Image (spheres, helix red, strand yellow):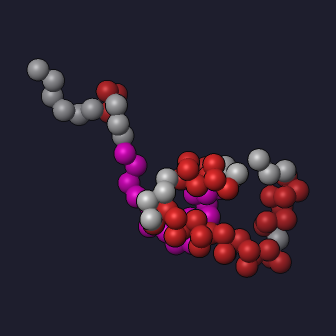
Amino acid sequence: MRTTQQTQRMRTPARAAERYKVAQSLQARYGAGATVPDLAGEHSYSVATVYRLLHEAGAHMRSQHHHGPAHDTRERP
């Protein structure tokens, strides 16, 4: 996890180019099939940060999949 100071430094205008580069990298990996939680773990970012960076990069978000019995809409015999 990043410290508060590290997060604030990422948000400064001087770091905008670096943030853009990270966002583009995340977008490329996401477009290749990586999941948001996987990207978050690989980069030590929160899931929310990855979503924010993907949105900043203009990534087309995949629909969320709902698996398991709570989301199973098939009729049961």
Residue 46 falls left or right of residue 59? right
Q: Work out whether 16 lies above or below 72.
A: below
Find residue 57 and report its horizontal and vertical position in percent.
57, 72
Magenta-span inclusion, residue 53: yes
Q: Residue at x 15, y 23 (%)?
A: 76
The quarter in which the C terminus is drawn is top left
Find residue 25 and report its horizontal and vertical position in percent.
59, 70
Q: Work out whether 44 lies above or below 30.
A: above
Nearer to me, 8 or 41: 41
Range of magenta residues: 48-65
Q: Work out whether 74 lies above or below 8.
A: above
Nearer to me, 73 or 45: 45
Residue closest to the far left: 77
Q: Residue at x 59, y 73 (%)?
A: 24
Q: Residue at x 15, y 28 (%)?
A: 75
Find residue 70 and report its horizontal and vertical position in percent.
34, 28
Residue 16 falls left or right of residue 68? right
Magenta-span inclusion, residue 62: yes
Residue 28 falls left or right of residue 74? right
Residue closest to the far top: 77
**Can residue 2 be seen here?**
yes
